[in-house]
């Protein structure tokens, strides 16, 4: 599984006005980890995948739009 960086950036813009710190708190991941992954594609491991799935479930979203299986 892999996180679709561009779709996750859309989530961040929609739910947190593009603020990495607020979005990382909602995902419960380190802000620098989130920033590095969204900007470079490095570090999108299972913790980030799990956080996106959890966020989607809590907000009534289909996680398959954000996670490439």
Image (tube, rainbow, N blue to C red):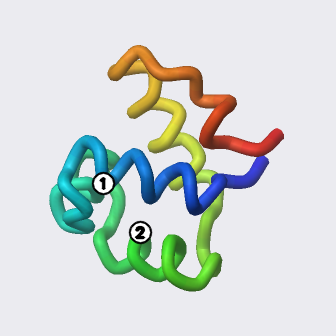
> In screen coordinates, is 12 left or right of 44?
left
Establish if 2 lies above or below 14.
below
Look at the numbered discs 2 and 1 and tell me whether their residues touch, using CB distance below 8 Å.
no
Q: Residue at image x 63%, y 80%?
A: 42
Q: Nearer the viewer, residue 18 or 59?
A: 18
Q: Nearer the viewer, residue 27 or 14?
A: 14
Q: Residue at image x 35%, y 20%?
A: 58
Q: CA distance from mark 2 to mark 1?
A: 14 Å
Residue 26 x, y percent position in the rendering: 24, 45
Residue 31 x, y percent position in the rendering: 29, 71
Chain-order first, disc 2 or disc 1:
1
Q: Quadrant of residue 5?
A: bottom right
Specify few, some or many for label 1: CA neighbours under 10 Å numbering under 14, 14-19, or 20 or more: some
Specify few, some or many for label 2: CA neighbours under 10 Å numbering under 14, 14-19, or 20 or more: many
Residue 50 x, y percent position in the rendering: 54, 41
Mark 1 sits on what residue? 13
Residue 56 x, y percent position in the rendering: 45, 28
Task: Give the structural element (helix, strand or loop) at label 2.
Answer: helix
> In screen coordinates, is 57 left or right of 32?
right
Mark 2 sits on what residue? 34
Task: Give the structural element (helix, strand or loop) at label 1.
Answer: helix
Image quadrant occupied by the C terminus: top right
Q: Nearer the viewer, residue 12 or 46?
A: 12
Disc marking residue 68: none
Q: Residue at image x 64%, y 34%?
A: 65
């Amino acid at each position: 599984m892999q996180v679709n960086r561009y779709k996750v950036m859309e989530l961040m813009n929609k739910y947190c006005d593009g603020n990495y710190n607020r979005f990382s708190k909602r995902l419960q991941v380190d802000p620098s980890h989130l920033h590095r992954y969204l900007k470079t594609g490095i570090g999108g491991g299972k913790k980030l995948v799990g956080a996106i799935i959890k966020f989607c479930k809590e907000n009534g979203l289909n996680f398959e739009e954000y996670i490439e299986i």
